[in-house]
Image (spheres, rainbow, N blue to C red):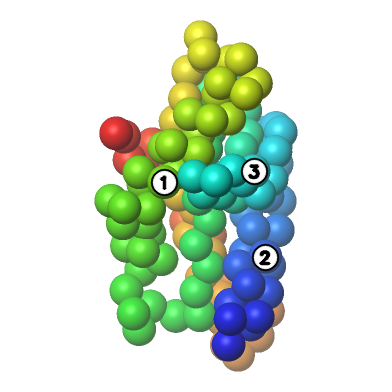
Amino acid sequence: MKTFNKDIGKFGEEIAETFLKNLGYKVIEKNFSCKCGEIDIIAIHKDYICFIEVKTRYGINFGIPAESVTLCKQHKIYKTAQVYILKKNIIDSNFRFDVIEVLLNNDNNDFLVNHIEDAFQL
């Protein structure tokens, strides 16, 4: 089951990356990780560096995907973003935390993407 979930997550991240590029985002990093955690996508859009968490699901039986970005998960993303900011020496930039929900269809290859800009702040 864990391998299946990783495969679904990876597929969702590919969909999200294409979605972002079509909107004019420049993806600068994927799956940045450190001991604090991982950020799925880091992209530049307009004047912002966006730290993007991607959540992919088949249906909403267990809630909408964004609901799984709990306060604890937000703190991990924030701490990981701090490491990235310091490592890349981009302290004077504008930052934003987004969530992208990818809902897959069991019956065919259709999917829905919901991009929540500025989804949380800490």
Q: Nearer the viewer, residue 115 or 30?
A: 30
Query: In the visual, does 76 lie left or right of 14?
Result: left
Query: Which of the two discs, 3 and 2, labels the residue nearer the N terminus?
Result: 2
The answer, for residue 86, to whether it is visible in the render is: yes
Q: Nearer the viewer, residue 76 or 6?
A: 76
Looking at the image, is 81 positioned above or below residue 14?
Answer: above
Q: Which mark is residue 76?
A: 1
Marks 2 and 1 close (CB-CB < 8 Å): no
Marks 3 and 2 close (CB-CB < 8 Å): no
The residue drawn where x is 35% and y is 83% is 61
Looking at numbered disc 1 in the image, what kind of residue is underneath it?
A: Lys
What crowding class fits label 3: few (fewer than 14 Cα within 10 Å), some (14-19), or many (20 or more)?
Answer: some
Give the secondary structure at mark 2. helix
- Quadrant of the image containing the C terminus: top left
Real-space CA distance between mark 2 and mark 1, rounded to the nearest whole angstrom: 19 Å
Looking at numbered disc 3 in the image, what kind of residue is underneath it?
A: Phe
**Residue at label 3?**
32
Real-space CA distance between mark 1 and mark 3, rounded to the nearest whole angstrom: 12 Å
The image position of residue 96, as x and y in percent, is 44, 30
The residue drawn where x is 68% and y is 74% is 7
Query: Which of the two discs, 1 and 3, labels the residue nearer the N terminus?
Result: 3
The image position of residue 27, as x and y in percent, is 70, 37
- Quadrant of the image containing the N terminus: bottom right
Could you say which quadrant of the image residue 90 lies in? top right
The answer, for residue 97, to whether it is visible in the render is: no
Q: Which mark is residue 62?
A: none
Real-space CA distance between mark 3 and mark 2, rounded to the nearest whole angstrom: 14 Å
Looking at numbered disc 2 in the image, what kind of residue is underneath it?
A: Lys
